[in-house]
Amino acid sequence: MAILAGALSLAVFGLLDHQSILAEGVTLARTGAAALSLALTGAVLLLLRSSHPPTGATTLIVSLGLLQTPREMVMLMVGVVILTVVGWAINRALGVPMPVWAARG
């Protein structure tokens, strides 16, 4: 979700072909992309009732242009999936109660 929000925000502000914020500096468009991406991520997490603050960092990594190619974004997604699966498996193996889904209404 965070990667998609970051990439969508880059597209909305016409920054897909721009260098990262480190090379280009802070611009109004980059600030808008960062704000929009965080707002989208926050809104989706609220709708899913699944708060996860580190998701904001992932969103910013993309919307600030630190990951620029689709390959880099896919590799980040793969890393997140691996980390999630391994963490879940370790907690299960150690007997830590880990629900598959914990959102409560």
Image (cartoon, helix red, strand yellow):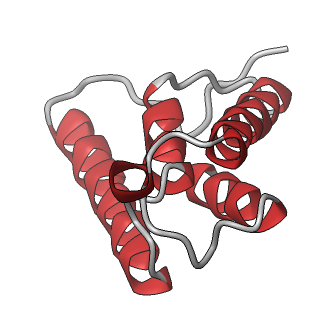
| Residue 64 versus residue 39 in the image, above or below | below
Of all residues, the one furthest to the top in this rendering is 105
- Residue 11 falls in which quadrant of the image? bottom right
Q: Position of residue 7 (x, y in %)?
A: 65, 64
Q: Residue at x 53, y 25 (%)?
A: 52
For image coordinates 49% across by 49% down, the residue present is: 64
Question: Relative to 46, does residue 81 appear above or below in the rendering?
Answer: below
Q: Is residue 13 left or right of residue 30?
A: right
Image position, residue 81 (x, y; %): 38, 61
33 versus 75 height, above or below: above
Q: Where does residue 8 sit, x and y in percent of width and height?
A: 75, 62
Q: Residue at x 17, y 42 (%)?
A: 90
Left-right relation of 24 to 96: right
Q: Residue at x 41, y 30 (%)?
A: 98
Query: Looking at the rendering, in which quadrant would you find the C terminus?
Result: top right
Q: Nearer the viewer, residue 15 or 93?
A: 15
Left or right: 45 as drawn, with respect to 87: right
Between 65 and 102, the one lying in front of the other is 65
Picture quadrant of residue 73: bottom left
